[in-house]
Amino acid sequence: MSAVGTEVDTHDDHHHGPARGIGRWLFTTNHKDIGTLYLFFSLIMFLIGGSMALLIRAELFQPGLQLIEPGFFNQMTTLHGLIMVFGAVMPAFVGLANWMIPIMIGAPDMALPRMNNWSFWILPFAFAMLLSSLFMEGGAPNFGWTFYAPLSTTYAPPSVTYFVFGVHMMGISSIMGAINIIATITNMRAPGMTWMKLPLFVWTWLITAFLLLAVMPVLAGVVTMVLTDVHFGTSFFNAAGGGDPVLFQHVFWFFGHPEVYIMILPAFGIVSHIIPTFARKPLFGYASMVYATASIAVLSFTVWAHHMFTVGIPLAGELFFMYATMAIAVPTGVKVFNWMATMWRGSITFETPMLFALAFVVLFTIGGLSGLMLAIAPSDFQYHDTYFVVAHFHYVLVPGAVFGIMAGVYFWLPKWTGHVLDERAGRRHFWLSFIGVNLTFFPMHFIGLAGMPRRIPDYALQFADFNMVASIGAFLFGFSQLLFVWNVISNIRKGRQATDQVWEGAQGLEWELSSPPPYHSFSEPPKVN
Amino acid sequence: MASALAFVAALALACMPAVVSGAWEVNLDPGVTEISRAIFDLHMTIFWICVAIACLVFGVMLWAAYFHRKSRGAVAKHFHENTFLEILWTLIPIGILVLMAVPATATLIKIYDPRDAELDVLVTGYQWRWRYQYLDQELDYFSNMSTPMEQVTNQAAKGENYLLEVDRPLVLPVGKKIRFLLTSNDVIHSWWVPAIAVKQDAIPGFVNEAWTVIDKPGIYRGQCAELCGQNHAFMPIVLDVREEEEFAAWLSEAQAEAAAAGQESTREWTMDELMARGEEVYNTNCAACHQVTGAGVPPVFPALVGSPVVTGDIAAHEAIVLQGKAGTAMQSFASQLSAADLAAVITYERNAWGNNTGDLIQPSAIAEKLSNATGGE
Ligand SMILES: [Cu+2]
């Protein structure tokens, strides 16, 4: 057990290990336990959301309706999106934040440990409620994860009410998580840990937390407007009652665009730790990385209507949102160039976390460039709502956010468990995922440009070949994730004892603690120099 | 790295025969209007700029990944800052973006000019078909997908234009400026024909504008692009673009047909006639929700077999078909179908699938109801 502290305080459970049994997990206020809970929850959601994606790809393997009805297909696309965004990606980042932020800034725990417990335990209930709608009369929500009115109001299945409350609960959980992270970072840094010494993962999360605080209430507002339109006779989004369906889209995307940066900024942070470690060279342009992240966050509030170029926006509006969107390419480019320069003249090795991080940079850049194409409003008239968009956002979210998360997990897993990573198993998982992801999403650019709309269960014959390739890739990618589960579980159970530093080039406070770290991280603040 | 190269090579090889045969479409359609070609050129310009940026970034990364490997004996340098570089790779991208913005802005300004149209067509989205009204021509009809359900459910071989064919295409003249006014009767749809590069949302309660001048006669196909419910995949758009004289001839013929259809409600119809017409009308207009078998998809779309409304009081049955039910997907059909079609479909529902009420509704009775309703407004 950890060293005995020096305080006079005699709470006798203070320096003990975790409680025994299920109670440890239900009542825990320990940042590592809660981090673990978040990460496992996110893994389960990733597998559920992934199974839905496979069902979608199975139906799209060939033209014609083979497996599922169009109505159920729409439920699958809706739930797949909601689960991956709110159940898999966001909780995974919160899990990593819980585990790593206190350790990286030299704090004993999160600032608000009880609220931390609460913000996690809301989530299983929120998703149980959302998933239970599958068994209701009329089925689960079927209006897409973007739930455009009036499809989600006047024309919605009865389960829309459950969807609204589910989203409210997820929002409360995220807001509490964000407050906790901000409080921890601002108050609990070790002496000497000045702002411009903060590790980049901490910086990116701090900025993400502010984005969450700003936009989750907007999401709560828009679902509440949906709720009152459905049940209480308001007409926010109903033209017949003096409302406006397009208002929904403005409010939704005012939340939705910063949301996409919420899902990518922490991954930027992770990659900014991994590349220097395996290039054995300090991160290039630390300060410019921080400023670039902050500028992306600020700009993300000014671009929402690029999701709405075809709703009938006046010319001046189209131009404004086109220019603002193009501007985001500048700070994003700065990040990519800095990673590139970090590799330059390093001494590079390719362990599993590095492979995922490099794939992240390359494939995220592809997603970024297709994003730039989509920003060009006149061309967007052809791309909008086609598979080109599907290809774009899956490139930034799967080999983007998800690879970023996996890179982080492989990077920090030996620290968490104290067991050295099985490199062969890790690389096998990487290469299968890499091939699978490209086989799935690259052809989607082609079918999108050739004219296939998104969210359809059946398609014209000219799209058949590439759809078949995409479906094969999806199954390859999907089943390779079982290797990930296997790798994580076998690393938890056994493996050679890892050193404190774990990786040769690793730098930072987290690598000074033992592997695994003591149950309470830094009882005494470390010295930062 | 070696396996990555092998993978790329294998993928390239696998694509070769496809590229040669041209069966695998990979790019936008340049289309048949000035605007669609402008958009295509813009798309290709931006695309090649992106390819160049990608080659540069990935090239540097690959170079470093190969030559600055530890296994090749590379020793890490320790530089980690260079203000000049940071400024350079902020300014150069800004320059490139400005270069991109110039043609993009020019094209956009061209698109936003719906003035001086010679023909106005009001396009209305319905769950799940399109309605076309030629505003000054007294012509108004619906366009439904004509691909048979047997092809969708794989009981019949799929035709060449599977899912992209309709019973009545939108017929347009070549070389004239046509203005589309778009709206919707229920949820948001989006009217998209790639060959003319028009994609505009059809929003209930609002009217959007778009326009085109088509250079070449031909058949051009598109689809609804905004998720609009269960049959979103099944509301295609077909344009039949004709030379000017052919269009004029078609127009007067279509107007004459429409006028003749208006006369149908004055005569007496037999049960067999009504049932035959009713089945046709039902299958194109009602089966998407209530199903061909009348079994519906409860609880969202009620079954009509044995339904108390359909087998009970005729007036209540007529009322729901004519007026619809506010706040549900059951829309008002009074302005969508002719009196004869309405009488036929109601008669059909009351006598098909074992409903056997024996009731026969004459078109003249419906016509009277319709004129009372408009008179009373
Ligand atoms: Cu539609």
Image: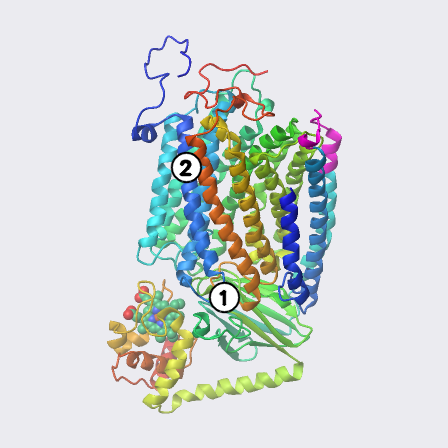
Q: Is residue A441 visible?
A: yes
Percent x, y for residue A254? 52, 45
Kind of residue at disc 1: Pro
Residue contact between numbered discs 1 and 2, judged by CB atoms under 8 Å = no
Camera-side residue: A265 or A350?
A350
Question: Is B287 placed above or below A218 here?
Answer: below
The residue that mark 1 highlights is A63
- Could you tell me which residue is drawn at 32 percent across and 78 percent down? B349
State the SS at label 2.
helix
Q: What chain does mark 1 sit on?
A: A
Is residue B79 rendered magenta in the image?
yes
The residue that mark 2 highlights is A40
- Could you tell me which residue is drawn at 71 percent across and 29 percent down? B74
Q: What chain does mark 2 sit on?
A: A
Kind of residue at disc 2: Phe
Camera-side residue: B99 or A465?
A465
**Numbered badge on residue B122:** none
Percent x, y for residue A132? 33, 49
Q: Is residue A465 toward the left or the right of residue A149 in the image? A: right
Percent x, y for residue A81? 46, 49
Q: Is residue B190 toward the left or the right of residue A134 in the image? A: right
Question: Mark 1 vs mark 2: which is more N-terminal?
Answer: 2
The stretch of residues the image draws in magenta is B69-90
Percent x, y for residue B204? 47, 62
Question: Is A187 placed above or below A246 here?
Answer: above
